[in-house]
Image (cartoon, rainbow, N blue to C red):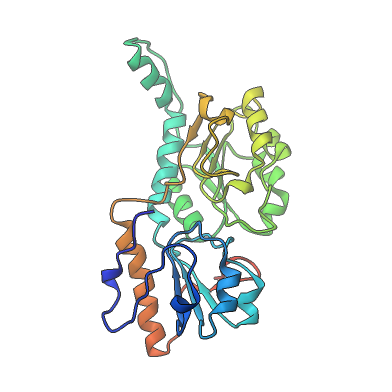
Amino acid sequence: MPPPPLALIPPDVDVVEVRGTPTGDQLAGAEVLYVWDHRFADLAPVLRSADRLRWVHAASVGVNRLICPELAQHQITLTNSRGVFDISIAEWVLAAVLSFVKGLPDTLALQREHTWLYRTTGRLAGKRAAVVGTGSIGRAIADRLSRLDVHVTLVGRHESSDLTAVAAEVDILIAAVPLTAATTGLIDAEVLAALGPAGFVVNVGRGATVVEDELIEALRAGTIAGAALDVFEVEPLPAYSPLWAMPNVLVSPHMSGDYVGFEADMMGVFVDNLQRWLRGEKLHNIVDPDSGYVRG
């Protein structure tokens, strides 16, 4: 990730910039920890070492790597950056779905070969899509798809328990959920088989939501027609992964939400919360550690 725009933090706040694992001296007296790099995963020892720490803010929406028992034990509030990436991720999903329906990968391949080949493609209007995840990102995706005359079903926690039945009724299955025990391996061979040979899978949530080996097998066998993936079980996606070479797969390096200027917008969410913190007001985007996401 690019460096955080620390100049946006109010000048009357003492800022200690940490590169790597924070030392005891760097943590001494700290009340707020801003985790800029979402890959930061070793929060527990930090919380045990920072006696005065009361609030951790994540510069990301997914916070599964930051959830640990020490949050509750030390009564530390965890917040995230919900809202920053809603529109950009929804736009990425639209681009991926339209590219698939309109056959743009084939068009580009034929262009590179200087081949003029007339053919017809599909229509997005009238397609049926299920968006798994009813958070702000999932709702933004559903809103924009519905504006293009797609029949959208929003799938929440209760409905996702019978995702096979949901998949059997749609053409496009979109995962936009945080990684929790309930969402790990949610989209498996059974769900993919129900989606069917014309089905298209999109994952902009977390890689482990989809059983990757079973997805690869479904793509190879023609169980489904294609997939657009921005997240993977292992990141960066290993060079040996078959997904790289599959013509019916879009591989994107976990960037669906990032846009020019997102760093300032993301810092803006933190600064707004910081002002609330300094005034003693309730923070926005408080994560429920038990569920792993912001409720409501």
Q: Relative to 270, does residue 132 appear above or below in the rendering?
A: above
Furthest toward the bottom, the residue is 280
Q: Residue at left 40%, top 26%? A: 104
In-image side of 50 versus 7 (left or right):
right
- Measured as percent of width and height from the top left, residue 225 is found at 57, 27
Q: Residue at left 42%, top 50%? A: 89
Q: How many marks?
A: 0
In-image side of 226 versus 114 (left or right):
right
Q: Relative to 202, does residue 181 appear above or below in the rendering?
A: below
Q: Residue at left 64%, top 34%? A: 215
Closer to us: 283 or 197: 283
- Measured as percent of width and height from the top left, residue 196 is found at 65, 31
The image quadrant of residue 110 is: top left
Closer to us: 1 or 292: 1
Residue 259 visible in the displayed image:
yes
- Measured as percent of width and height from the top left, residue 260 is found at 29, 51
- Measured as percent of width and height from the top left, residue 170 is found at 60, 39
Image quarter (top left, top right, bottom left or bottom right) of the C terminus: bottom right
Q: Relative to 70, does residue 192 appear above or below in the rendering?
A: above
Closer to us: 162 or 48: 48
Q: Relative to 28, does residue 96 appear above or below in the rendering?
A: above
